[in-house]
Image (spheres, helix red, strand yellow):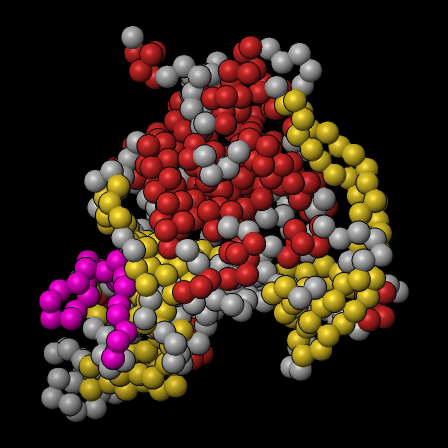
Amino acid sequence: MQLPVWNALYQVRNFAQYVNWVRAKDRAGRPLPLLELNDSRWQISGAEGGAVVEYQIYVDSFGPFGAQLSAHHAFFNLAQLLMYAVDARNDPMAVRFNQVPEGWRIATPLTFSQDGIYSADNYDRLVDSPVEIGTFKESDFDEGGAHYRVVVDAEPGDYDMEKIAAMLHKVVIAATSWMDDRPFDTYMFLYHFPRGPAGGGMEHSYSTAIDVNADVLARSPEVLTSVTAHEFFHLWNVKRIRPQNLEPADYTKENYTRALWFSEGCTSAAADIIQLRSGLLDEPHFEQQLASGIGELERRPAHLTQSAEDSSLDAWLEGNSYYRRPERSISYYNKGELLGIILDLAVRDASHGHTSLREVFQWMNENYAKKGRFFPDSDGVRLAAEAVAHADLGWFFTKYVQGTEEIPWNDFFRSVGLRVIEEKNTAADAGFAASRNFDGPMTVSAVAADSETQRAGLQVGDMILEINGKTAGQESSDDMAGLAAGDTITVKVRGRRGGDRELKWKAGSREEITYELKGLENVSAEQQARRAAWLMGEAQVSQAALSH
């Protein structure tokens, strides 16, 4: 019997640390010898006629990547709870939930039978199906021949179900039409809007689980739209268009791939297009976000030393705070999204506007996903891009995907009548660096020496709970960017040995290069046409027109 050591996140988390005890018996109830082979695997002797294995496991990890059972609800990523028989992983599986409190309901994409059992074709499909049990609210809708479930666990006053459903209508229409595909009949959106720390989403083949802090949802509803578009597109890119090196999943150790820049980053690029096509994102905000992403990459010294492929391989180090420092690593999400955007422009240029990133994804969907094949990491992306562009794009992958050459932004954006402007500005300096590891707390990784911050008592390893009265989360970097030199920063932190404390200091200042996308002077009709097609994720000359 094996309990996975990782699931959802690209990090070994050793779920067996929460197993209190394990017992085995035969069908007659007689004890069977049980040998622990390593910290996550057990061998049962005398089980030729089958065995019953019982164990107790503690679960209290909140968020879309976790498993939690509380007085409020239960949320399960089943790989964190359920062992599998090593020689029977591909056999049909079934699960039943007992002692469910009165008034609680169950929501999961698993197949339900009338006798209370949920089933799956195999273990992988079973654990790719999150489970919510509680007093959640649900609002379903049909669109384009598919049924969508919208399940929300939150305080009723913290969200508007009608607005969420209206947003989802637009997202699913834009995404399925862009891919010209719908590989499901039923899909479930599962949302948690807690009032405490929250953030992030986890994709599944027939569902997604997403957490957004209730305060963040109230003041920045576009955060929910963005993460929803990203996670929904994952049902193609990652769940079906999948790197070969991640198959079959090995639950006993790290699974390495060089293609997370594509699987995650280019999914973000697709999510941008989905939001633009649906009218949920306009051009000025898209270009503002794009310039911000360029700045994020350029301000990390590691962009000169770590490639997008190496960042993908090193994903398993992201649980370590030092690794997340700007001189050590870049984000395959950040650079991958930028690579997706400029790959789109490169394909358009090579094909004279006849194809785009859309055709790259559709080619991979037809030639890999629908044929039950997996793509050979970055080489598979290059093959697809060259197939639709009818051109050699090896230079692009050698320089910017495998290599660390500076990206000549204006060489790419010129074709759509844009340019990147760099300006030196005086920016507020908070005096520390901090980052979040997926759904983990924001943790301080560096404190400026001889600074107001250091004198205030902030220390490396402190967990940041609140910044200026707001719960620390994925939006905190935007809030900090709005500070001015001399502004007071109030931070609530929890030390490595426990104990909360409140610290105050005034922000300093530093010279910083900022980036902005602006239109070129005298933009040609060709550039205008390409920009319009680019923003909608469409080729300038449709394939239907070419066939005529």
Q: Position of residue 402 (x, y in %)?
A: 57, 37
The residue sitting at 29% across, 8% down in the picture is: 548
The residue sitting at 75% across, 53% down in the picture is: 483
Q: Position of residue 370 (x, y in %)?
A: 26, 37
The verdict on residue 207 being magenta is no
Q: Which residues are magenta?
A: 102-129
The quarter of the picture where residue 321 lies is bottom right
Query: Residue lying farthest bottom?
Result: 30
Q: Position of residue 414 (x, y in %)?
A: 62, 20
Number of numbered discs present? Answer: 0
Residue 354 or residue 320, whichever sits in front? 354
The residue sitting at 11% across, 71% down in the picture is: 115
Q: Position of residue 506 (x, y in %)?
A: 83, 62
Quarter of the figure that contains the N terminus: bottom left
The verdict on residue 105 being magenta is yes
Residue 327 horizontal side relative to residue 155, left or right: right
The residue sitting at 49% across, 59% down in the picture is: 212
Residue 318 horizontal side relative to residue 87, left or right: right
Query: Residue lying farthest top?
Result: 548
Residue 215 or residue 250, whichever sits in front? 215
